[in-house]
Amino acid sequence: MYAALWRVLPGPVWVRILILIVLAALVLFALVTWVFPWVDSMIATQEDTVSV
């Protein structure tokens, strides 16, 4: 899969690396902005405290 992605990207090696870094940053941004909060709202959390 990664080899196919590498072949599809245009430009020299440094441009491909830059494109992959930008794509990875966009994916992480989307996960933190929309996916993780949605999953957090689906999980029932219990607010228990530990008494000493």
Image (tube, rainbow, N blue to C red):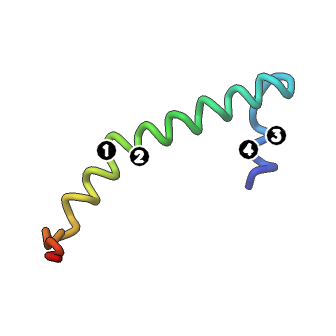
Q: How far is disc 4 from disc 1 in space, using C-alphas?
A: 25 Å
Per the image, the residue denoted by label 3 is: 7
Q: Nearer the viewer, residue 12 or 31?
A: 31
Q: How far is disc 1 from disc 2 in space, using C-alphas?
A: 6 Å
CB atoms at circles 4 and 3 under 8 Å apart? Answer: yes
CB atoms at circles 4 and 1 under 8 Å apart? Answer: no
Per the image, the residue denoted by label 1 is: 34
Per the image, the residue denoted by label 4 is: 5
Q: Residue at x 34, y 50 (%)?
A: 35
Q: Residue at x 50, y 41 (%)?
A: 27
Q: Residue at x 75, y 33 (%)?
A: 9
The residue under label 3 is which amino acid type?
A: Arg
Q: In which quarter of the image is residue 39?
A: bottom left
Answer with left or right where residue 31 lies relative to residue 2: left
Estimate how packed mark 3 is, as few (under 14), some (14 to 19) or many (20 or more) residues with alpha carbons within 10 Å.
few
CB atoms at circles 3 and 2 under 8 Å apart? Answer: no
